[in-house]
Every structure is written in structure tokens, then in C-alpha cells.
Image (spheres, grey):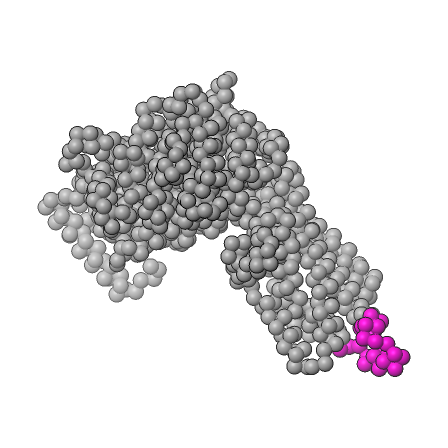
Amino acid sequence: MHLMLLPGLIFIIIFAYIPMSGLTIAFQKFIPAKGLFGDQTWIGLDNFRYVFELPSFTQVVWNTLYISSLKLILGLVVPIVFAILLNELRNQLVKRSIQTTIYLPYFLSWVVLGGILIDILSPSRGILNEFIMMLGFEPVFFLGDNKWFPVTLVLSDVWKTFGYGTIIYLAALTGIDPGQYEAATIDGANRWQKAWHITIPGMRMVIVLLAVLSLGQLLNAGFDQVFNLYSPQVYQSGDIVDTFVYRIGLLDAQYGVATAVGFFKSVVSFILISVSYFCAYRFAKYRIF
Amino acid sequence: MKGLTPRRRLIKLSVIVLACTLVLSACSSNNSGTGSTDGNGNSNANSGTPADTANGPMTKYDPPIEISMVRNLSDVVENNVLSVLEGETFEDNRWSRIYEEQLGIKINYDWVVKGNPDSDAYKQKMNVTLASGEIPDFTPVDAIQLKQLVDSELIQDMTQYYDQYASPLLKDILEQEGTAPFDAATYDGKLMAIPETGSNMESGMYLWVRTDWLDNLGLEPPKTMADVRAISKAFTENDPDDNGQDDTYGLVATKDLWGGFGGLEGFMAGFNAYPDIWIEDESGELVYGSIQPEVRDALLALQEMTQNGELDKEFGIKDGAKVSEDIASGKIGMEYGEQWNSIWPLQLNVNNDSDAQWQAFPIVSDLADNTSIKVPLKFRTTKFFAVRNGVENPEAIIKLFNMHVEKNWGETAEFDKYYAPPEAESVWQLSPVQPAPPKKNVEAFRAIAAAREANDFSTLEGEAKTIQEKIDSYESGSEEGFALWGWERIYGPDGSMGIADQYDKNGQYLLDKFVGAPTPTLVERQSTLEKLQNEVFVKIILGDPIETFDKFVEDWNNLGGEQITQEVNEWYEQTK
């Protein structure tokens, strides 16, 4: 039976553990053509020192935390509310079609959605801004204004993924004993009271578990999304660790520095995952080992 | 090519034998077309090594050789060249054919990326290629990438090949900008790549102004910086196009800030500010132009202009192509740019609105004497061809160079076939190597101007002749000629090249003082510092407090700028 684990293990060893040897690049003045184990110059912590001196780096870390915590919170609240509302619908056909419709964007890649959003949100010819102007307001430059860019990121991400979350919570709802609702009806509880006192407590375990586990993802603010939507004008508010690494590494060919940033991110993520694992055990009695 | 079957090997052998006999017979007859070469068919009759046959600047390889390169496919080539020329493709066109037929060099591209060499897609592909170590036989790189290749010991010394194979014409052309292009590619006394010498003079800036708007508002062409500000204000506020709407801008900028179209170098020069180049201070040391206090003044002026609505507040996300749409729709009154701007994008404006008229003016400052204003020039040799270790015919790249200059400017030149045929612009860009005489444009202008003076155009030849035909066509007033308006604006009596001629004669050019191989810190920090600078400048122009500039100067120094300045000055000491 344990043999079945083998393909997965090999996969992880090849794609996760072996590449870790590349972390040495973070401490080198790396010249790629000489190879990973070639004759590289060791420069200690110089790459890290340089990164922390960069004025944009603190901003980048802050952006990452800001964008991803907003995504985390809204990504939790919106699907829960939606699941509860859907659950109250009597008509199964309507419920199913809504469920399917909101699930659809989840399957589109950000490359495709990026192109669509740039058109929809354009200040000069996008539908959304034409609507805003029709109401008599100034057009909003969603993808070019540092005030609006993070908001646009968070909202579009929530829109894309909340269908998926909704389905998980709907599944959790089916696990609640219908007897409790019948009892509450007999006691004279209205719909709000039933939702508050039965539905939400019934979902508590799933909510806590998903929330805690997503903590480990806090430094992943969504490379595909940001990369397809940002421009130099909104680096100030929209540049995240992953896009920063991409630019330094692949565009500027500063492999040592890029690896140092990636290493830094991994260390912080590791701490976060450990904390969230501890919390998951503490609050939801969830454990792997 | 691996594993030929015996049959195919036989065919190949017989082809070689046939080809050899052809060469032998060609020797005995007349060997025209390839210029100063001798066939020397004897030594190669039975030896297979091509190196033996390759002894002249343009001797044909026999049997033909295949080489690998990588390239970008620019918008210009895709839209203006390939879409117009029938039966020619990026891989198979008049240039690839002549290289194959006359030099026996077949060029294969390992990859081709759409876009310009400064696009993210190209840079990324190039960096990955360099990092993988699996580079093509001949790689076009910039100075920094060249340094990386030298450090990784992937490429070979070209010194001896250049001396031996470069034709006298090629040497003359590549060395017209002095030794700097070669210095930038020389490491430990070895020439590690062949520079494609660029024309520094071509980066000179002009102030392009819509003269029909000037007339409309009763204004004079700008003579001082104050004039520029006043015209910009008037163009923005006084409805120069008489359409009753507040929809015009005085000046343009692009998100990249600098460059041949809409670049702010010309504006900054009006403040004696020279961003992005190294200049000499009073003590004779080199200092970086971008961090000097004059830049602060220029930024402050631009900030005021943005607040007045004279610059588009959305410029921070608009690249040149996007800004050209504003030009085309007649919203822009002035722009700083290079001499060719009338061909693109200003021609677009004129195509849409035949009343529109633009003219280039010399850049101005508030100095008393306008001929003493310095016109900053960048060091324009940015492309070097590096040759991989183990390539059997390293000199092939030099032969390509030789052929390119020969067919355009040599004795057997067919300028109107290979450079600028009547049916398409920029045909020379089909060739993977594009060396050109650095002063060819201004010399063409001087020839045309002299002919205009003498009223005798029959003496013109080569490029000047082709250009004069375009001007004639424009002046005939035909519909076809109307599309050549842009050429008249460059080489005509009021043309931008006339100003270049003046700049040159007045000694107004101020060339980047640092032209050596990139220093170690420059390699590592340059692009980061440049991005930091441009981000900060865009933000200041869009309204960030000007004190941000002081913080930038501090950051620049701390992040390696100080170190770079030191290294650059060490180089400067050595070359003095």
C-alpha cells in the first residue's frame, strides 16, 4: 500500500527538494554559465544586505501582506455569506444555476482574465467607466491609480474564486443535522435566528480550518494576477514579492539577489505555516502527524 | 543533420564535388561581384575544412556553412517590411539570399521573439539563453551581457579575426566613432565581440513643434526655455485646433521618460541637465548626470506643467506606441525627439489631418547664446556580436558585416534594393547584422543641400539620391508623395538634418563621457538604479514633493552609485 506514495514522493523530491540546492545562489555572485556547482564566488550575506537597502523592498513586502490579507479576509467572508444565502433558496433549479455561474470564472486563467479586465476597466473606453461617467462621476483609473489598484486586485480575485469557496461551504452545510432546524422552527425561531444559531456554528470547524491553513499562503499574493494587471505606474501599491523576484531575476539577470529574496520569502512562509499548523491543531483539532 | 543515411551521404558528397568544380571554373573566368577577393580554389579542392577556403573578407564558403543566431522580430519589420514585400519571409528574404548565395552562409535562428530588443519578452528570453549556457554560434548582446559572457568564459577572442577579415570599408565604418565601440568590447586586451557601431549623433534631440498651431495662435517659434513654456501653455489652454474643446496638450512624455520619441532629454538639456550620461564636473571628475541639481529644476518645471494639464496625467502608463495615438489624433503640440520623428509618428497626424504641419527646431535653453547649448548624446554602440567557443568559422560574422556594408555603401552597392527600395521602408532591418556609417544621414543631407544650392540634383548617388527622389515625389503633390511628407521634414530645406548639421558645425554635441566596458558594480546595479530613477522621476512629475529627488540622490549613492562613480573615474584616469 505504501508503494502508492512513491510517485508522489519522487515528484516532491525532484521538484521541491533537489531544487533547494539552488538556494546556495543566494550567497554567491552567481554566474549561470559556470553551473550550480561550478566555480562561483561566495559573497556571504551581501545579496541580502543589498535587498534590504533597496527602498522599494519594504514597500513590496508591505504590499504583499496588505493585498493577501485583504484577499484572505474577503475570500473567507464572501463565500460564507453566499453559501448561507444560497442555502436558503427553495428553488433547486435557481440554486444550481447560480452555483454553476459563480463557479465559472474560477476556471479562467489570469492571462485571459487580465486582457478582459484591462478592457473593462479602461478609463477611456471601458464599460465600467462609461457607466460611472453616465452617473456623472469622474472616470476611475482602476489599473493605473495607486489608491485603486490594490482594491481592484482584491475584488477581482474574490470575484474569480468565491464560487469555489461557496461550494465547499455548501458541502459543509449539508452536514448539519436537519433535526436542529425542525426543533428551532418549533421553538419559533425565524430565518435569521436559525442562520445565526445553527448554520454558522455548524460550519465553524470548516471555517476555522480553511482560515488557519490559508495563513501559510500569506506571502503569496497571486503572481499570475498581479503580473497580468500591473504596470510600472502602480509598482508602488501593487508590486509583490513574486513579481519583484521575477523582474530582478529574469529581466535584470541578478540571480543571486532574486534567490535571496525568494529565500527570505520561504523562511517567513515556513514560520507562518508552522504557526498556522499549530493553530489548526489548537482550534480545529486538525493534525497531519 | 545527425545520422545521414549512406545514400544521402553520397548525394552530399557529389554536391560538394560539383560545387568544387564550379568554384574552380569560376576562378578561371571572372570573379566579379564579391569585390576584392580571390577565389583560391586550389587548396580547398579536397580538404573538407571550410576554414581553409575562408581567407578573404568576402570569400564564399564552399561547401556552404550553417550558422545559428537568435533575433527579435520588430513591429517595423513585421508591419512595414514583411507585409509589403511579397514572397519574402523573416527567414528567407533578399538579405538571407545574398548571404547564402554570395557568402555560402545559411543563417538559422534558434529562436525569434516578437518585439523590440528592449521589450520584456526579448530580454527574458535572452537572459534565459545566456543563463543556460547554450548560446547560439553568434549572439547579439549588449555591453552588460557581453561582460557576463566574458565572465562565464563562453566566447572566443575575435582580435585576430577582425584584423584579418574585416574589409577596408567595414573597418572605416566601424571605426568612425573612434575606438570607443572597440574599447567597450575589449577585455584584457582581447576583442571579445564585434561591435555594431552605432551613431552617437543620431541620439541628438530636436524640438518638434506644430507650426500650424503656432500660426493659428500668432506665436513665434521658441527661442528660449521661457518660450517653450509659454507655447506649451498656449497650446493647452487657447484651443489651438479651434474645435472649442479643452482637449490638447502642450508637450508629451512617455512612461519610459527617455528615448527617440517623446524623450525628455531635450527638455532637460534646456536646464543644463543631462540625465543618464556621465559628464565632467569642474574638478575634472566624472559625475552622473541624473543626480545633479539641474535635473531637480527640470523635474520641478515638468511637475508644474503636469499640474497645468500641459502633460497628459496618464503618461505614466503610456508607451511610445500609445502616445503616438494622441499625436495621430491631433492632441499634441510639441514633442522632443530625434531627427526621424516626422516619419513616425508625426506622419500619422498629417495623414489624418492634412492641415497639420510640424517642423523641427534646435533645442533651446535660457542661455544668452543659443548656439552654446549642449546637445547630449548617448553612446550608441549597444549591440555586440559575441562568438561562442568552438564555432568553426568565427570569421563568418565579419563576412556578414562586410557584405552588409558592401551592398549598401560599397562599390557594388545596390542601395535601392537592399536598403531603401521604393516599395518598402527599412528593408535593411531584414539582415541580422546592420552596421552602418555613423554619419551617413548628415552626409546625405549635406550632399542634398549642396545639390539644392547648385540646383543640380544629377550628381547625387546612393542614399542621397534615393532620398532626393522621395522629396521630389512629395513636392510633386501626388497622393503617393504625400506619404513621404516625413522625409521632406528631415532632408528638406527646413529639415531636422539641417539642424544636426548646425549642431555638428557649432560643436554643440556633448557625448557621454563613459564609454568603456561596464564596470563590475555597473553590471550588477545599473538596471536597478535606472528603474529606481525612472520611477522616482515619473512620480515627481506626477506630483510627488520635489524633496523626493534629494532622497533619490541619497539612495542612488547608497545602492551602488557611489561605487560605480569611483570605478568609472578609475577608468577615466586610465584613458586620459
Give the percent coordinates (x, y) of residue B375: 41, 28
Magenta: predominant secondary structure element? helix
Total labels: the figure holds 0
Q: Give the range drawn in magenta.
A: A174-199
Residue A184 within the magenta-colored segment of the rendering:
yes
Residue A79 within the magenta-colored segment of the rendering:
no
Q: Quick check: can you spot residue A274? A: yes
Give the percent coordinates (x, y) of residue A18: 61, 55
Q: Residue at x 17, y 35 (%)?
A: B457
Q: Which residue is drawn at 83% across and 79% down?
A: A181
| Viewer-side residue, A149 vs A249 | A149
Farthest top residue?
Answer: B283
Looking at the rendering, which quadrant does residue B220 occupy?
A: top left
Q: Residue at x 26, y 58 (%)?
A: B86
- In the figure, is residue B86 to the left or right of B135? left
Q: In which quarter of the image is the N terminus of chain B?
A: bottom left
- In the figure, is residue B76 to the left or right of B236? left
Q: Is B341 above or below relative to B107? A: above
